[in-house]
Amino acid sequence: MGSGLLSIFLPLYVIDRSAIGGSLIDIGIMASLALLLAIPGSFLWGYLCDKTRRYKPYILLSFLTSAILLYLFTYTPNIALLIALYGIMSLFHVAHEAPKNVLIAELYSRPDWEKHFAFYEGFTEVGLLIGLLSGFIMSTYKLGPTSTLFVCSGLNFVAFILSLVFVKDPALVFERSLVNIEKTVDFASRGVFLASRLMDGVSATEKLKRENVNAFFGGLILFSLASSILFTPMPIFISERVAAASLPAGAVFAIFVLNSSGGVGGYALAGRRVEQSTDKASLSRIVLFRSLFALLFIAALQMSGLVSVGLATTFLISMGFLYAMYLIYALTLSMELMPSGKSGLFNVLIGAGAACGSFVGPSIAKYFGFFTVFITAGVIFVLAYAVFRVFM
């Protein structure tokens, strides 16, 4: 809830002349710095939680430091100091990402990973949705920025208390190791089978091929880069469309509520048990559809008034749905492919792409306009699709 509220509030807060008085470039610098600091943080927390085989302490650290730093935001009228505090918060915030992924992977068997990753992400997406609704209500009643930051801080502290009570470390940690052994044995078994057929003079149509892990990693980076280029300046684009249609400022939060609702639907669909091959095929198709919707935003840019807002809202709902499904498939595959001790690598790769995109996106919007933002994001999504096809 705190993240949902902060995600839309903070960019608007930065450019508000009565608050911080920053610019799109300041938003890009802030987001980029935060994501760059999150990269070594993801490596560190992922390594430490796997090394110690303890996960709860890092989840607690994440929520408690976020609560403290968000409280300090209320005493920060300077843009440079706000950027610095946001960067530090990002470094500690990612401390919960790798541990929660490992907890889900270790507490459930491989056939149930999609279902439980989808349940977790869907459950948190509902929290994001409620946070966005809170922002809409607070904006409607014209509550000040300080009150909003207090709410964000308080929600993170509640998350800390709930994690302290409910999160438990598993007694044994072995499921991911078993999955890696199974994959190796399956590959060797298929190799022996094909070799025996060839020795018997029988032609074999099946090809013995391992997944191209580097292509998977490259696809993650490109997808994250395109998403960040598109979505970092998106609250500003939506606020401009809303203002041009003479709608109240709270409509910005309402539109992102609908975007989050699309994500909930995506998690519900992705929670169905699917075969591993379906994961890979679905992953590439989703990326291709995402590129299409990124380019379709050009239509919303060319329209005006309520038509423009309606088109943008429709595209955001669709992209929220697609992202939810992408995340479940990508998370599940990453737990299979990334060895113990490197569970934070998934967040590192995503952070690397997002760090670049979060600066490039607002910069393109400022100097070349949103038309170029949509074209750039769409092309990079297509490149991500091509790389994921190589992975398969």
Image (cartoon, rainbow, N blue to C red):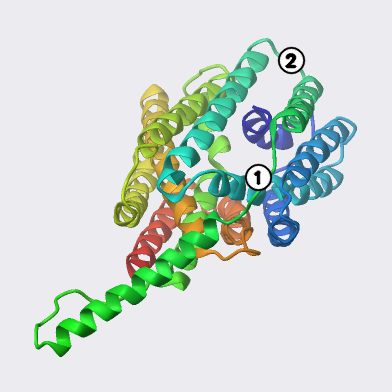
Q: Which of 113 and 87 is in front in this view?
A: 113
Where is the N terminus found, in terms of image quarters? top right
Residue indicated by mark 1: 170
Disc on res. 143: 2
Q: Can residue 371 be seen in this view?
A: no
Kindly identify the residue that appears in the image at 47 percent across and 60 percent down. Answer: 179
Q: Nearer the viewer, residue 306 or 337?
A: 337
Q: Earlier in the sequence, mark 1 or mark 2?
A: 2
Q: Position of residue 380 (x, y in %)?
A: 42, 60
Disc on res. 122: none
Residue 64, quarter of picture: top right
Kindly identify the residue that appears in the image at 90 percent across and 32 percent down. Answer: 75
Kindly identify the residue that appears in the image at 65 percent across and 45 percent down. Answer: 170
Which residue ends up furthest to the left in the rendered image?
202
Q: Which amino acid does label 1 sit on?
A: Pro
- Local secondary structure at mark 1: loop
